[in-house]
């Protein structure tokens, strides 16, 4: 039987706890916005390796703005941002490109290139950022496509596959170089609940297979429950909640409480079974 012992270094460890954690994204007193207009102020948060963090908030609350700032596309108006230990806005081109290689992105309207095949879409980051020979890239694409159940679709055009399949292709593209962290802006937006659940499933699967860290923007409570190890919620120009789903269920903040306790949509209440069948029919 295991013997419980007091850890004699407990106290000493506390000071170094934060250093010991593998923090992949660190925002300090960050102000994000466009031109002279601040959208988010005083943003302080950290994302640790292996976490899936859901970024929640109403439409226009600044979710995409924060993501763009984190991935190096929108310089902050003030404060600091560190991604994988580097400030993306203070790097020389070659250093910046090295950093970008370790980051995967699924943009909100990040459609695939319509005139390129599934293979060409996915292979692009590998062709741009590495010197890997084509047969190796081809094998990487094949393996990852089969992980998301899309083996054999390499030569299809995006318009010839379903919306849910397109999102999976976008995820494979974002993760083709085994990035440390993937930023996904509303990866299941516009999909019906069953197909969206399938996308959530592959996100989870990629996180566990590759220990990929993910920041996923969503407004779906179901996605949050399935996906999120932790939730950051934006409102009124700042972070109003930062905690696990269980913690936020019990939040006394009205906006947080309302989100976690809102009613299911009518069609689910009317008969979940029917909606599941209808969605499956649409998918097939
Ligand atoms: N390129 C832009 N220039 C100026 N304002 C913008 C731009 N993009 C978004 N905004 C504004 O920033 C706010 C937050 O937008 P966004 O980050 O897209 O919200 P969310 O993703 O949460 O819906 C909105 O008021 C929006 O109008
Ligand atoms: Mg957005």
Image (spheres, rainbow, N blue to C red):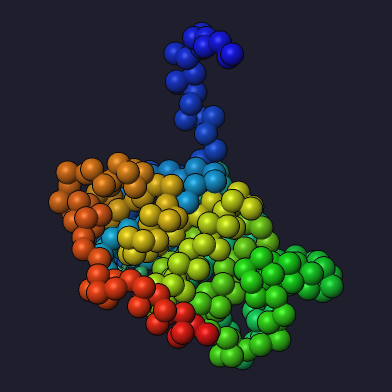
Q: Quadrant of residue 205?
A: bottom right
Q: What residue is rendered at 50% in x and 68% in y?
A: 199
Q: What residue is rendered at 54% in x and 29% in y?
A: 20
284 on left or right of 178: left
Quadrant containing ligand 1: bottom left
Residue 164 x, y percent position in the rendering: 51, 77
Q: Quadrant of residue 29?
A: top left
Q: What residue is rendered at 49% in x and 23% in y?
A: 16
Q: Nearer the viewer, residue 242 or 151?
A: 151
Q: Is residue 126 visible in the rendered structure shown here?
A: no
In this rendering, is residue 280 above or below 51?
A: below
Q: Quadrant of residue 95?
A: bottom right
Q: What residue is rendered at 66% in x and 58% in y?
A: 178
Q: Nearer the viewer, residue 266 or 196?
A: 266
Residue 259 x, y percent position in the rendering: 23, 57
Residue 280 x, y percent position in the rendering: 46, 79
Q: Is residue 138 visible in the rendered structure shown here?
A: yes
247 on left or right of 67: left
For the N terminus, which image quadrant?
top right
Q: Nearer the viewer, residue 247 or 57?
A: 247
Residue 165 x, y percent position in the rendering: 56, 78
Numbered-mark total: 0
In this rendering, is residue 265 above or below 30?
A: below
18 on left or right of 78: right
269 on left or right of 138: left
């Amino acid at each position: 039987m295991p013997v419980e012992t007091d850890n004699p270094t407990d106290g000493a460890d506390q000071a170094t706890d934060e250093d010991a954690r593998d923090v992949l994204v660190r925002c300090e007193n960050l102000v994000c916005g466009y031109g002279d207009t601040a959208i988010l102020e005083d943003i302080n948060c950290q994302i640790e390796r292996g976490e899936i963090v859901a970024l929640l908030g109403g439409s226009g609350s600044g979710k995409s703005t924060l993501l763009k700032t984190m991935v190096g596309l929108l310089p902050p108006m003030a404060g600091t941002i560190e991604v994988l230990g580097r400030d993306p806005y203070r790097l020389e081109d070659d250093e910046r490109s090295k950093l970008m290689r370790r980051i995967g992105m699924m943009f909100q309207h990040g459609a695939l290139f319509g005139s390129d095949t599934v293979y060409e879409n996915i292979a692009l980051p590998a062709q741009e950022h590495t010197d890997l020979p084509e047969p190796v890239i081809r094998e990487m694409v094949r393996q990852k496509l089969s992980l998301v159940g899309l083996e054999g679709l390499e030569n299809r055009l995006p318009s010839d596959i379903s919306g849910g399949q397109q999102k999976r292709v976008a995820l494979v593209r974002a993760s083709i170089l085994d990035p440390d962290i993937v930023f996904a802006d509303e990866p299941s937006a516009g999909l019906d609940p069953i197909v969206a659940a399938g996308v959530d499933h592959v996100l989870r699967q990629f996180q566990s297979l590759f220990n990929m860290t993910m920041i996923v923007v969503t407004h779906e409570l179901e996605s949050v429950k399935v996906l999120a190890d932790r939730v950051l919620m934006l409102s009124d120009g700042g972070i109003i909640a930062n905690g696990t789903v269980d913690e936020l269920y019990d939040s006394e903040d009205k906006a947080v409480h309302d989100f976690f306790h809102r009613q299911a949509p009518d069609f689910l209440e009317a008969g979940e079974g029917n909606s599941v069948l209808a969605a499956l029919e649409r998918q097939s």
